[in-house]
Amino acid sequence: MRRVGIIGLDTSHSTEFIKALNNAKQTTAYNGYYVPIAYPYGSRKIESSYSRIGQYTREAKENGVAIAGSIDELLNNCDVVLLETNDGSLHLEQAAQIFKSRKKVFMDKPAAAKIDDVISIYKLAQQYHAPMFSSSSLRFIEKAQQVRNRSFGKVLGASTFSPAKIEASHTDLFWYGIHGVELLYTVMGTGCVSVRQSSTTDTDVVVGTWSDGRIGVFRGTRNGKHDYGGIAHTENATVYIDQYEGYVPLLKEIIKFFENRHLSGSSRRNPGNLRIHGCSRQK
C-alpha cells in the first residue's frame, strides 16, 4: 500500500481521485495506492474554488481521508503527492515545499497562473531533483494518443476546442483554456514557434505555427454548450477526437509515473522558444 497525499480540496478532481483510489484500495486496480490524508487549501480568494472546500472536505472524510492542518503535516504522512489546488497562483509556493521533501508529485492543471511561475516551478524541480509532471486529463484520451503515436500516419495539422473561462487572477487561457491547448499539443507535438490570437467576449481563436510549417488551431468557448474534442488531419485519415473519457486514463498514468516515471505521450516544452504576434482581446 502506497500513501497518496492530496493538496487542495477546492476542485472536483480531488474527490474523484479519492473515490477511485480508496474504493480500489483492496484491489490491484491502482497498484495499492490510496489516499489517507489531504490538506484542503486550496484557494482562499477565488469564489468558485473556496466555496467548494467545505463540501469536498466532507466528501473526503466520508471516504476515510484524514484532514491535515498543514502541508508539512501532510508530507510527513504520505509517500507521493497529488497537487490539486485549483488556484494556480498557489502552485509555486506549494510545489517548493513538496520538492524539498523529494516526494514524487503530479501537479494538476493549471501548472501555475502565469508563465514566470511555471518556469520557476520547473527550475525548482530540477534543483531538487524532484520527479514531477503536470497535465490536463485530455492528454490521455485514447484517440489523441493514437494520433500522437502516428497510428494514422504523420500529423499534418489539427484543430481542438474546449471551454475557456477567464479568471482575472490567471493569465488568459491558463485558467481553463489549458484543456484544449493540452489536447492540441498532444496531437501536434512540440515545436510551436509563433502564435496569433483573436478574442471576443465569448470566444478565443488561437492559431499556432510549428517550426516545420504545420498549423494548429485552438478554439476556446465561453457560451453555448461546453464540450471537449478536436480534429487531427493525418496522412491516412481525418481523425475525430470526440470521446472524453474522464479522469481514469489520467489517474492510470499518474500511478505509472509514481511507479517508474514513464508516461504515455510525455513531452518537454520550452516556453522560451515561443513568439507572440497580434494578441488582442476585444470587449
Image (cartoon, rainbow, N blue to C red):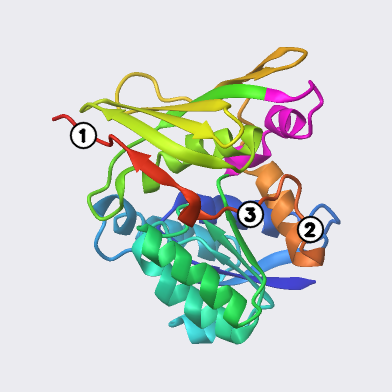
The residue carrying mark 1 is 281
Q: Alpha carbon of mark 1 to alpha carbon of mark 3: how far?
A: 29 Å
Mark found first going from the N terminus, 3 or 2: 2
Mark found first going from the N terminus, 1 or 2: 2
Toward which corner of the image does residue 36 lie, by quadrant? bottom right
Amino acid type, mark 2: His
Which mark's residue is nearer the viewer, 1 or 2? 1
Residue 123: in magenta span: no
Q: Quadrant of the C terminus?
A: top left
Where residue 37 sits in the image (x, y, percent)?
A: 58, 73
Tell me if residue 276 comes above or below residue 23 in the rendering.
Answer: above
Residue 146: in magenta span: yes
Q: Secondary structure at mark 2?
A: loop
Which mark's residue is nearer the viewer, 3 or 2? 3
Magenta region: 137-155
Q: Nearer the viewer, residue 162 or 74?
A: 162
Residue displayed at 29% across by 55% down: 51
Residue displayed at 55% across by 78% down: 98
Q: Quadrant of the N terminus?
A: bottom right
Q: Secondary structure at mark 1?
A: loop
The residue carrying mark 3 is 268
Q: Are marks 3 and 2 in contact (CB under 8 Å)?
A: no
Q: Alpha carbon of mark 1 to alpha carbon of mark 2: how far?
A: 39 Å
Q: Residue furthest left?
A: 283
Whether residue 151 sits left or right of residue 38 in the image: it is right
Q: Secondary structure at mark 3?
A: loop
Where residue 187 sits in the image (x, y, percent)?
A: 65, 32
The residue carrying mark 2 is 262
Circle 2 Cα neighbour tier, 10 Å, few/some/many (<14 / 14–19 / ≥20): few
